[in-house]
Image (tube, rainbow, N blue to C red):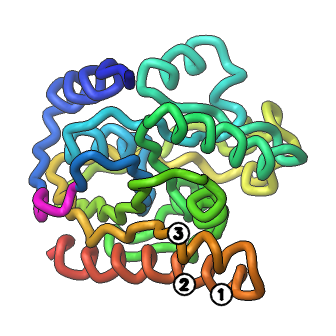
Amino acid sequence: MPSNQPLNVSDGLLKLLGTRTFVYFENRIPDDAVVVVVSNHRSFMDPMMLMVGLGHSLRTACHHYMGEIPGLREAVHLLGCFPLANPSQRGISFLQQGKRLLQAREWIAIFPEGGKPVLELTPPDQMHPFHEGFAHLLLRANLSNLVVLPVAIASLQESISHTFPIKFLHWLDPSEELFNQWHRHPMVIYHRVNVLIGRPYWITPQLRQHYRGRRCQQGVRELTDYCQQEIQHLLASGCR
């Protein structure tokens, strides 16, 4: 059975930071389902925001280097994160790890924008294009009652500090192109945030059947577009 530890740790940390969280459309959270949460991403706080907003522990995909640094490795473990493999094995590893967690009926959180908006900070109401890996995971997982839940994290009040040069991370992972820059890593602390839950998208046997056929790429694109458009729509109202 999934542990409540990541949720409890997240709740405690947000209280310590004094973050005020407002949750909308909670009635859209599915009952008795295996859930993949998809969200926008601007801050290290985002996994915590999702867990507290949904009232459920999540296993969050995070960057490879986070599992390599003593101290940070233990911290992300407490928050339920699972570090991805290095870039050469990342795609296969993500699918294997994700399917294993879903089969154990764990809820997973994925940030399809990747790390770019965290390093090259975007305004709260904007997003980068989504990568499609999460859609492949959903359509390959052979599970009943599987659903993707788009969630928008809409910052209303925040503070931003600029910490260490991003190039320092390049020494930990030379294969990551995003780390090959010298400007300082922005750190976003949320003070007031809306968490808006989107309309769930159920993964039906018909969708999985199309994934195995000629419409494979079309199904992946439709699922990816649905999640991005749903979150963008929620951000447009939630950031006001």
Q: Nearer the viewer, mark 2 or mark 3?
A: 3
- The residue type indicated by label 2 comes to Glu
Quadrant of the snapshot with the N terminus: top left
Report whether residue 55 is seen.
Answer: yes
Q: Which mark is residue 222?
A: 2
Of the image marks 1 and 3, the number of the one nearer the N terminus:
3
Quadrant of the snapshot with the C terminus: bottom left
What residue is at 42 percent from the left and 26 percent from the top?
A: 79
Side (left or right) of 197 relative to 74: left
Give the labeled residue for mark 1: 218
Count of marks overlaid on the render: 3
First to last magenta residue range: 24-29
Label 1: few (<14), some (14–19) or many (≥20) C-alpha neighbours in 10 Å: few
Residue 125 in the image, given as x and y percentages of width and height: 33, 74
Side (left or right) of 98 relative to 102: right
- The residue type indicated by label 3 comes to Pro
Describe the element under mark 2 as helix, strand or loop: helix
Of the image marks 2 and 3, the number of the one nearer the N terminus:
3
Q: Nearer the viewer, residue 36 or 229?
A: 36
Residue 225 in the image, given as x and y percentages of width and height: 51, 82
What residue is at 20 percent from the left and 64 percent from the top?
A: 196
- The residue type indicated by label 1 comes to Gln
Q: CA distance from mark 2 to mark 1?
A: 6 Å
